[in-house]
Amino acid sequence: MNSNYETAELEQLLSLNAPLENVEARWQRKARQNNNGGNSNNNNNNNGNNGGDRFIPNKMNIDIGHFNLTKENSNPNPNAINNNSSTSATTTTTTTAATNNIESTLYKDTLANQLFESNSGDLESKILSFKSKAPVGNVSSSTNSLRVLYSQNQVGSTPTDQSLKKQFRQIPQQPERILDAPDIVDDYYLNLLDWSSQNVIAIPLGQTVYLWNATTSEIQRLFQVEQQDDYITSLQWTKDGNYLAVGTNSCTIQLWDVAHTKKVRELRGHAGRVGALAWNDYILSSGSSDTNIFNHDVRVQNHHVSTLSGHSQEVCGLKWSHDGGQLASGGNDNIINIWDINSENFETPAHTFEQHTAAVRALAWCPFQPNLLATGGGAADRTIRFWNTITGVCLNTVDTMSQVCSIQWSTTYRELVSSHGYSQNQLCVWKYPSMVKCAELTGHTSRALHTAISPDGETVVSASADETLRFWRVFEKENKLPTANRKSKEVSDGSMMRNINSLIR
């Protein structure tokens, strides 16, 4: 009989769907306990240590939690049972019920300890807890194996601070210094400015050629033409910067030794003014308004080597390629001719480009890509074109919205700068090959006819019909000159400007 009772009691205990009888509801018990011991409970809560500010769920065994709740609600007040058993000892039925109730409670505790390990702490666990926190997963152990794999692909694609600095470098919008250039001839077809490899600028003002040493700030008056109606039409330094070739309106070319301030020789042969000059080692090429290009060997007495006839109007642009293999010529007939020295017949142009619709004076060979030529058209054209001089293909065309007077490639960046005339008189810095405009430099009030680049490739000087020279630090190399040194340099140049102005005037 006793075993049957225990079996039934165990089945009733393990059956979670069985209804609970004579059990006080949890909210009723809590309300009664709060009313009975409010002050003591409040003190305990105030002195207690709260483990957190919110409930953090623990994924514990739901069956164990349900058992604990059932166990707690099955005997809400065991002290009351003990009191009832002592006061009602005379009643046999009441005593027997209390004894059975105590035995049942002891049996349930023994059974629970046998089913669950007492040292595991499962019986004391709660579904919702203040103190227990969610476990922190070991994320690094699962991702370390893939970190190297994905980081290897990002080595070349992640931009560094230096690359961003190069991509978004700042270009000064104001000229570094300004010099007066009175009596400079306002003529689109002449070439009146050049910067030597020894850091000396040559510029003709009226009938006189002046030299300015950018290193020492010294000014030198080289010579003055003799005839009253004569004037300087072009000039060009040799590669070593020791000699200066000067073309005149009197159809002659003078070759000067700058170090000794001495005219070495005079070259004749043209029937018109010499508006363009270009050196290729010891060969001097000259373009004239007589539509011809002469090649002079300055080492021999009979200097005239060959004549290139490919234009129908004045030749206003001449440039030898960096390797000396090709000569580009531009004229007032809107034509560009490419003369190849390695061809069977050098006196016949290898290519003739006729896409420009105005005079072509701006010619520039790319320093970092062989056989790439940039050309610029006049006021009726306004475009910059890029040519492959081997295949004769036009690679790109950009409308600058202004007359193109000159073009200079950068030797530091893949960029070029162009100077313009009508109608904006500005300098533009372009990225190549995208031809995105990096900067627009304004300040000239008339056509920026001539430009030259410094030997270090950082500064571009522009000469304008507004009778000023402006120096733009367009292609400055990073961290070359401290700010303090640069300011002191500008102060010394300012005093030099006053000297050159007084000398010229």
Image (cartoon, helix red, strand yellow):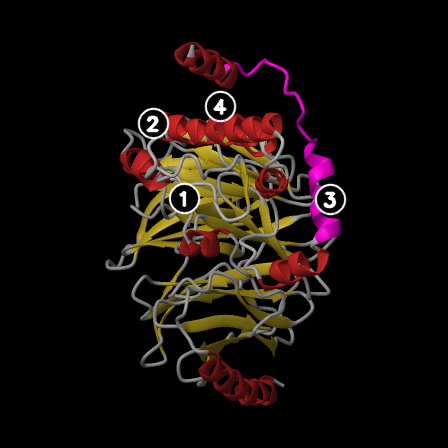
Q: Which residues are magenta?
A: 15-36
Q: Sequence-wise, which precedes: disc 2 or disc 3?
A: 3
Tell me the distance, in whole angstroms, between the alpha carbons under discs 2 and 3.
33 Å
Q: Are marks 1 and 2 in contact (CB under 8 Å)?
A: no
The residue that label 4 is drawn on is 63
Looking at this view, name the residue that lies furthest to the front: 90
Q: Which residue is mark 1?
A: 158
Mark 1 or mark 4, which is nearer the start of the sequence? 4
Mark 4 or 2: the one toward you:
2
> Which comes before the other along the chain, label 3 or label 4?
3
Q: Amino acid at mark 1?
A: Thr
Residue behind mark 2: 114
Residue drawn at (46%, 72%) of the image: 201
- Report how far apart the C-alphas of labels 4 and 1 lie in the structure: 54 Å
Q: Amino acid at mark 2?
A: Gln
Q: Secondary structure at mark 1?
A: loop
Where in the figure is residue 65, as x and y percent of width and height?
51, 30
- Pointer 3: residues within 10 angstroms few (<14), some, or many (20+)? few
- Nearer to us in this view, 353 or 306: 353
Q: In front here: 4 or 45? A: 4
The question of residue 231 being in magenta is answered with no
Q: Quadrant of the C terminus?
A: bottom right
Q: Which three-letter amino acid code belongs to the residue tagged 4?
A: Asp
Answer whether labels 3 and 1 touch (C-beta < 8 Å).
no
Vertical side of 497 occupied by 24: above or below: above
Identify which residue, 155 or 228, lies in the foreground: 155
Which label's residue is closer to the chain start, 4 or 2? Answer: 4
> Which residue is label 3 attached to?
32
Q: Nearer the viewer, mark 4 or mark 1?
A: 4
